[in-house]
Amino acid sequence: MRNFDEHNITEAVLGRVRNASDPRVRQVSEAVVRHLHKFIREVDPTFEEWQQAIQFLTDTGKMCSDTRQEFILLSDTLGASMLVDAINHRLPEGATETTVLGPFYVDNPPVAELGDDISGGAEGIPMYCHGIVRDSGGKPIAGAIVDTWHSDDEGYYDVQHYDEGGTISMRARFQTDENGEFRFWSIVPNYYPIPDDGPVGKMLGAQGRHPYRPAHVHFMISAENCEKLVTHVFIAGDKYIDSDVVFGVKESLIKALDHQHAGTAPDGREMDKDYAILNYDFVLSPGK
Amino acid sequence: MRNFDEHNITEAVLGRVRNASDPRVRQVSEAVVRHLHKFIREVDPTFEEWQQAIQFLTDTGKMCSDTRQEFILLSDTLGASMLVDAINHRLPEGATETTVLGPFYVDNPPVAELGDDISGGAEGIPMYCHGIVRDSGGKPIAGAIVDTWHSDDEGYYDVQHYDEGGTISMRARFQTDENGEFRFWSIVPNYYPIPDDGPVGKMLGAQGRHPYRPAHVHFMISAENCEKLVTHVFIAGDKYIDSDVVFGVKESLIKALDHQHAGTAPDGREMDKDYAILNYDFVLSPGK
């Protein structure tokens, strides 16, 4: 076929991608073409604008590294990640709600012992974080794998300091004990801007949006015969709790810190300064 | 706002991007969000599929370099480039039709003299290419800038050989003479696969598509008070003329080679082997 114009090209492209042997590839390809062409027809871009779009995507790809995933940031800030999360989690009653993975998860985090301090000596308010992991029947799960990671007192993740010689901190993997409990020490995380020195930061600026996320602790929890849970616990009272740049906040995931004076902590540790306790129990959905 | 779910998140994201101060940024941002979310709702991706999509875009960005633009290839192979071309070129009667720029244009090509051989000594059938550039009133344009670039006898562009020490060839910038004519020698280009060792090549494979473009010579022509013309001249009879992977072929841009025996060429050059003539006249639209 020749002589493609604005009226017949979509059908022509659909005709080509229908040759895909895998039905899912065919379905997704057709949807990409239809929606992309509809978008172009609606927006009616000039050549220069289309070139800018190409350059934006190129810059976004170039920004990606082992410790920075700019396309995840783009997906997050356009609400796409939370939408994908929502359609994949029509959860049974009582199961802990999910939220975005975010761009700062690192595969194979360091394994730590229950009760360890994972702050790496970072400054801030000490935080004792603990909770119980249960199955949907309410039974504590022993040996569940609990990955956690969070920002420091200034809102930076460890990976954002690697360039300046920083090492792994505020990031670890635990295993729950026979009572299904995990516990560790760290510091209270702070709200923070998502990395905004790249294309996504420029986009947010152009859209008149702030780049902040309210303070939270990430959790990824897995156990036999259960769905892997990816979520955060948000710290109540944060100034950005109602305007999270990635739309990740859910009421059920907000928890107040329990502020304590210096003294004996719940795990017997003697604290010579004030500290906070973050307690959150998780319920995993049954595996599919 | 909190508690985003699959029903309210699109409106929430639209509410944020409406803060854009530039009305065009606002319009495009809203359209991106609406179409992207519609696409996600239709396709209903699993987490793993969404992760694959993120990885595909990341890999596409990583593949881009000074001599390789994988996002343009993606836009081309999804018919998006030709659609953008079509909606930007509702041309006046008689003007030469346009087609995609493609990923192999290089800024500031070497300036050559009319009649020069730009083949760089590449093997193949010699080709004498000439034509007249006219305005929409039919008047020849002296001093028009004519950029041309094309593949070699095996279907490769010069930039694809840079890694192995190749240099600029089959690529030049001319100025039309007082009669509006351009003329140069090169070799007859061949059909070729778009670079298919990257993400776009994988996509085409999954979609059951071949990666070929029919043989053509690129032209980008500009002159005062005229619209810049970006087009190709396709060589008639090519086996891929009806299945161009980037949907670029238009009937009016197809021209047959005029095959000649050794002897005196139209510009007086003595040819000791058979050669071909490609003659195409261009008509530029009035500038806006």
Image (tube, coloured by chain):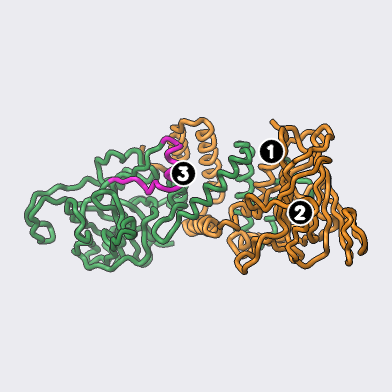
Chain colours: A green, B orange
Range shown magenta: A191-208
Please provide percent x and percent y for residue A57: 53, 49
Judged by depth in the image, the label closer to the viewer, 3 or 2, is 2
Secondary structure under tag 1 reads helix
Q: Does label 1 lie on the same chain as label 3? A: no
Label drawn at residue A13? none
Label 1 CA crowd tier, 10 Å (few <14, some 14–19, many 20+): some
Give the residue drawn at x 71%, y 55%.
Answer: B171
Cα distance in 3D space between marks 3 and 1? 27 Å
Residue to which mark 2 is pinned: B217
Secondary structure under tag 2 reads strand
Q: Do the residues labelled 2 and 1 touch (CB within 8 Å)?
A: no
In magenta stretch: residue A200: yes
Residue to which mark 1 is pinned: B87
Cα distance in 3D space between marks 3 and 2? 40 Å
Is residue A137 in view? no
Residue to which mark 3 is pinned: A78
Please provide percent x and percent y for residue B176: 78, 44
Label 3 CA crowd tier, 10 Å (few <14, some 14–19, many 20+): many
Could you say which is closer to the camera, residue A162 or residue B41? A162
Secondary structure under tag 3 reads loop
Q: Is residue A181 left or right of residue B259?
A: left
Is residue A208 in view? yes
Please provide percent x and percent y for residue B111: 69, 51
- The amino acid type, in three-letter code, at marker 2 is Val
In magenta stretch: residue A180: no
Which image quarter is the N terminus of chain B in? top left
Nearer-N-terminus badge (2/1): 1
Task: Tell me which chain the residue with mark 2 is part of.
Answer: B
Task: Tell me which chain the residue with mark 3 is part of.
Answer: A
Cα distance in 3D space between marks 2 and 1? 23 Å
